[in-house]
Amino acid sequence: MKNIKILITGGAGFIGSNLCEYFINKGACVVCLDNFATGHRHNIASLINHPNFTLVEGDIRDLETCQSAVYGIDYVLHQAALGSVPRSIQNPITSNDVNVTGFLNMLVASRDAKVKRFIYAASSSTYGDSEALPKIENVIGKPLSPYAITKYVNELYAGIFSSTYGLETIGLRYFNVFGRRQDPNGAYAAVIPLFVKQFMSLQSPIINGDGNYSRDFTYIDNVIQMNELAMLTTNPDAINTVYNTAFGDRTTLNQLVGSLKEILTKYKPQIKHVEILHGPNRAGDIPHSLASIDKAKKLLGYSPKFSMKQGLEQAVDWYWKNL
């Protein structure tokens, strides 16, 4: 990785900070671009004084900031976005500004700077109302939320920049990523860190619906592997396309809570007696999500190392030590 210069947008966020840490440890030069709207300085505190790490504090909605950040960069790993389906339903304009306008700014800046490849965080929400399982990359439905629309538009723009301008792009459709540094706080906290925090405080987690909705929960290290493979692949058939980024197995919310309770009870026996509550289903949620990872295996050589249960063990241990 020496002499490789990588720009990671949203680099102070959950996924971005893990990517920054990984590639710095591999010897790359890393530039982190973040406006700290959802990212945190403590996520990158250990990297700030590293000679190969540069922090650019700025917003992808500003084209000049994007152009400055991408100068001299070999690869862009674009993670910056406003996540969360509920957030996009509550405030679709801001989600669109960040996720579409910001994305387009990064594409333009990357094209003009002649970066080698633009790898971006796509989303399993793109599958929308398609009921087919497992989810296969070329079969999608209608989006069910403003967030899903923005992430699909990203794929369309990336395709146009590949075909029209020759910019190499790869989209990674993330499926419910979890792991160290995922924020358990705030109105739009993801389900795993939120439930861990509640269990640790002996509070009852609330499952949306009857708990039979299922997800392909994907540990952060599998996502890091996919980003690295997408960045370094020399297979011409592997570029200018999108890939499911997942483990390839599904877990219901009831099963998830049961696993979390079992793991956390080892740390705090009282958790065994915490009651599980149920609330209404959440608007815009897809009932079931399961990825086919055959395409990533075939074209990128992807081989996920962590199952959901193995990832949960790692994540819970991190939260126990850091919350």
Image (tube, rainbow, N blue to C red):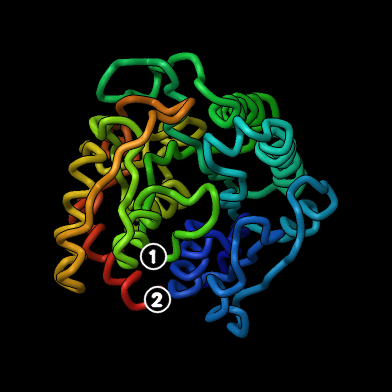
Amino acid type at mark 2: Asn
The one nearer the camera, 159 or 282, is 282
Residue 180's disc is 1
In the rendered image, which quarter contains the C terminus?
bottom left
Task: Give x and y (percent) for residue 50.
Answer: 58, 83
Visible in this render: residue 188? Answer: yes
- Left/right of residue 223 with respect to residue 215 in the rendered view: right
Residue 318's disc is none
- Left/right of residue 318 with respect to residue 79 in the rendered view: left
Q: Which class describes the residues within 10 Å of circle 2: few (<14), some (14-19), or many (20+)?
A: few
Task: Give x and y (percent) for residue 147.
Answer: 57, 31
Q: Report the residue at 28% width, 65% height from top.
A: 316
**Labels 1 and 2: the sequence-earlier one:** 1
Amino acid type at mark 1: Arg
Q: Report the residue at 48% width, 70% height from top.
A: 21
Q: Report the residue at 58% width, 70% height from top.
A: 29
* SS label for mark 2: helix
- Estimate the spatial distance between the alpha carbons at disc 1 and disc 2, rounded to whole Å: 9 Å
Quarter of the view holding residue 321: bottom left
Residue 322's disc is 2
Above or below for 245 versus 22:
above
Visible in this render: residue 294? Answer: no
Report if the CB atoms under discs 1 and 2 are less than 8 Å apart: yes
Task: Give x and y (percent) for residue 319.
Answer: 35, 69
* SS label for mark 1: loop
Foreground: disc 1 or disc 2: 2
Q: Report the residue at 19% width, 73% height from top.
A: 267
